[in-house]
Every structure is written in structure tokens, then in C-alpha cells.
Image: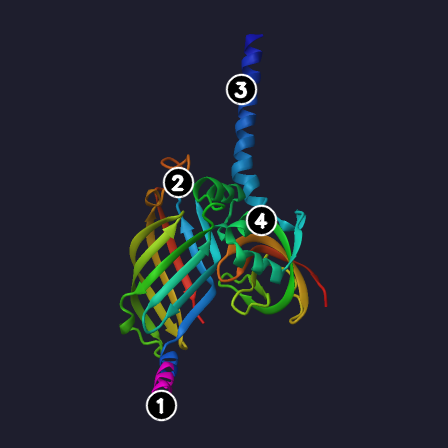
Amino acid sequence: MKNKIVWALIIVVVLGVVNIWYYVFQYSKTHHRDVANEVATLVTSAQLVKDFQSDEKAANVKYLNKAIEVKGELLQENKDQSGNITLTLKSGDPFSNIFCTLQPGLPLPVKGSVIVVKGVCTGFLSDVVLNNAIVVKSVE
Amino acid sequence: MKKAILSLILFSGMCFQLHAQKIYSTKTGQIKFNASSPLEKVAAVNDQVDSKMVDKTGQIVFSVLIKSFRFENQLMEDHFNENYMESSKFPKAEFRGYITNASTLNFAKDGKYPVNFDGTLTIHGVQQKVTASGIMAIEGAKPTISGLFKVKIKDYGITGSYIGNKIADEAEISVNCKYE
């Protein structure tokens, strides 16, 4: 009887350790945050830049690390040094736009169109920056 | 009349100044972070580095958002942001300074030039004076800066609960920025 309890305990502990190991080193490597599955609030590119310019701290509380959908006119399409596609959305202020890095392997929107980009807001440099983004729709 | 001539001279002088100085910039520079220990690989890459540089004066600035660092392991990325960098409180890191040997650089001539940096690095809200060296490669009048330097994590008041056993106490930062 005692033996059985000891064995049962050992099995429980081993399973626990294996589970933790799997979650920390395997699951977390293959399961990355994906904005496609997250609920996001919609904001225009002009409003987003305005929010960060008028009060960066408050805007950080509101947007940082959250999934947001930004609607704006596509200004530029480029590639970064790792080969990811980057999109710049016009905000109305020529010195401060929305800079988005897309998830790899996505189809491109047409230049000059109004689009909605969904991504994780990582903060404000000269532009408001979105990471891990996807193009949700092209409006025009 | 005299005033008008004077201001004209001054204005043309300013125009010349503007032409004589060029600002190079990028929004897609790359900074890699490596604090791996023999036990664990702790490495991340940031492809959204904002950097500007003035050719004549050597003035240079690099700005990064901490939340733009991407790790292979999502859990590690969350720990990095929440426990170590406290990136909601301190969303940015920045280097502001000078290339001290800017006068030796010829932006019109292709080649590789050694460069030295001197300035202030701000991480986790803590400012420290730093010096570093790197290479500037110029190709078709477009410069690329690459460099590698080490940062003592404790110097910046970063005290995650795992420090000391799991991650290295020195982080390696490598910079690679292609300017336009």
C-alpha cells in the first residue's frame, strides 16, 4: 500500500515537471501571440498620432501592448533588414505617421488605398509603432 | 538696404550650411540582444530601430521600443518585458551621442571605416555614459553602421528575480543599421 502511494506521488511529480518543461520550452516557442485572435479597438491614424503627441504617458496606458486596429491611407511600403514587410500609414502630420511591421507571408494591399491594419502597439518614437501586424481590410 | 544685403548674405550662408550637412536616417535598423547563459538561450531581435545621424558633426541617436524586441520563446518575451525591463513603465531605450572620429569619414567614397562612439545610453530609465566602437561601411553613398558592445545589467537597475543564475549579468548588444 505504501509503495503504491510512493509510486503514485513520483508519477504525479514527474508529470508535473514534464508539463512545466513542455509549457516553458516547447509550447511557448511554437505558440506566439497572434493579433488575429484578439479583440481590438478601431482608431484612425490621425487620432492615434494625436493621442501620443498630446499626452504620451496617457496614450501608453491606453494603447501599449494592446491589439489595435488602425485605419489610414497607405503612404509607403517597404522591407526591413530582416525582410519583413513594413507599411507606413499617413496621419496628416508629415513628421509622425503609423509604422507597422507585418507578420511574414501576408498578401500586400494596393498602394494608395485606405486600409485597416491590426497589430500590437509597441509605443511612440517619431512614428507610432505597430508590431506583428496584419492587414484586416482595404477600404478603397 | 544694408540690412537687406546682410540678411541675404546670412540666408545664403544658411542655405550653404543646409547643403553642406546631410542627415542620414532609418526606421528599420536592427538591434540584437543576447544575454544567454550556458543554461539558457536568451536572445531577441528588434527590427524597428529609429536612428538619425549627421555626417559632418557625427551626431547620432538610436531609439528603440522595448516591446518591439521579439524572442523565439513567447514566455521569455513576456518575462523580459514584465520582470526585467518593466517596459510598460519604461517603454524606450535610447543612445544619444557622437561619432568622435566623424572627420575621418568620407561619405562619398565606398569603403569600411572604423568608428568610435561616445554618448549617453538610457535603459530602464537609467542613464549611463558609454563608449563603443564599430564599423561604418559606405556603399553608393549609403552608410551602414555595425557594432557590438556589452552592457552590465545591474548598471541599469534591472533586477529580475532570476538574475544571477539563469541569465548572464552582461548582455551583448549588436547594432546593424542601414541608413538612407
Decide if residue B164 is on the left or right side of residue A78. Answer: left
- The residue drawn where x is 57% and y is 60% is A50
Neighbours of disc 1 within 10 Å: few (<14), some (14-19), many (20+): few
- Distance between the Cα atoms at labels 2 and 1? 65 Å
Q: Mark 3 highlights which residue? A: A10
Distance (Cα) linking label 3 and label 4: 47 Å
Which of the 4 quarters of the picture holds residue B133?
Answer: bottom left
Stretch in magenta: B2-14
Kindly identify which residue carries mark 4. A62
Q: Secondary structure at mark 4?
A: helix
The colour scheme is rainbow
Say which residue label 2 marks. Answer: B167
- Which label sits on residue B5? 1
**Mark 4 against mark 1, which lies toward the viewer?**
1
Contact check, label 3 and label 4, Cβ < 8 Å: no
User: Label 4 is placed on what type of residue?
Assistant: Lys
Residue extending farthest to the bottom is B1
Is residue B122 highlighted in magenta?
no
Q: Image check: A103 left or right of B68?
A: right
What distance separates the C-alpha of mark 4 from that of mark 1?
53 Å
* Residue B8 belongs to the span the image colors magenta: yes
Dot 3: chain letter: A
Q: Nearer the viewer, residue B15 or A105?
A: B15
Quick one: SS at disc 2? loop
The chain to which mark 2 is attached is B
Disc 4 packing (10 Å; few <14; some 14–19; many ≥20): few
Up the image or down, B14 lies above or below B71; here it is below
Residue at 37% across, 77% down: B21
Label 1 sits on a secondary structure element that is helix
Q: Residues under labels 3 and 2: Cα distance?
A: 30 Å
Quadrant including the C terminus of chain B? bottom left
